[in-house]
Amino acid sequence: MRKLQVQGVHHITLTGADRQTSIDFWEGVLGMPFIFDQPNLDNPREGHLYFDPGDGRLITIFTNEDRTPDPRRTPTEPGCVHHIAFNVSKAVFSQCVTRLDERGISHSGPKDRGFMDSIYFKDPMGLMIELACYRFEPPVGCTHADVMIEAHRMRVAAGDYNIQEKHLADAIELLVERRQQTLSADRSPKNPY
């Protein structure tokens, strides 16, 4: 028996309202360029809009001109999508409250997640959207996941409840030590003063 090894998210398809509401939210609020438009090939009464969330992957939306926005929260029972999170820079995250408030979009306010900051609000169809901002940059040649797994190991070893910035800093130091060579015989911390 062998795995079916995945290599990333290809796309996520969501059920949206009408065409214009979908464009206004995904491009007009979240800034995702609207890059492709065709019929839903499995249901010709629906449109299928494609947006780039910023990494070249795709978010696609099935639209129907008979559907109108429904702000009630989408189901969160087991098997349902709870929320979708999108990465934003620190500069953008610092503007989220102001820019959501300007549009009258209700939101959670900033949330401290230890390794990232988050804010939550609903799309026009009641799907919870999270904008997340990492509190760290991974070392060159590493990914956020590389830092997270090392920070997790450090958190567990320390008996801490959740990942904190000290775990991230120590994980980054460890990854740099592993990946980058030095001419020094001793890489331990020093006090030059």
Image (spheres, rainbow, N blue to C red):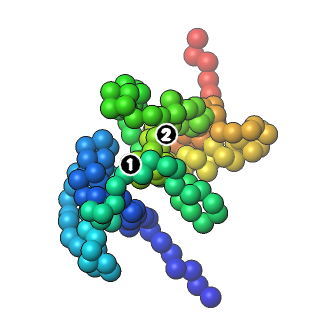
Q: Identify the residue at image location x=69%, y=39%.
A: 162
Q: Identify the residue at image location x=52%, y=42%.
A: 176
Which mark identifies residue 185? none
Which mark identifies residue 124? 1
Q: Identify the residue at image location x=31%, y=78%.
A: 43
Which secondary structure lies at badge 1?
loop
Going by the numbered disc 2, the residue's amino acid type is Tyr
What is the residue that sits farthest to the front in this orientation?
Answer: 66
Q: Quadrant of the C terminus?
A: top right
Residue 16 position, x and y percent, is 36, 59
Q: Identify the residue at image location x=50%, y=29%.
A: 109
Given residues 175 and 55, the one toward you in this image is: 55
Residue 97, above or below 160: above
Residue 129 position, x and y percent, is 45, 46
Which secondary structure lies at badge 2?
strand
What is the residue that sits farthest to the right in this orientation?
Answer: 159
- Label 1 to label 2: alpha-carbon separation: 13 Å
Q: Quadrant of the N terminus?
A: bottom right
The residue labelled by disc 2 is: 120
Residue 148 position, x and y percent, is 58, 47
Density class for disc 2 (Cα within 10 Å; few <14, some 14-19, many ≥20) is: many
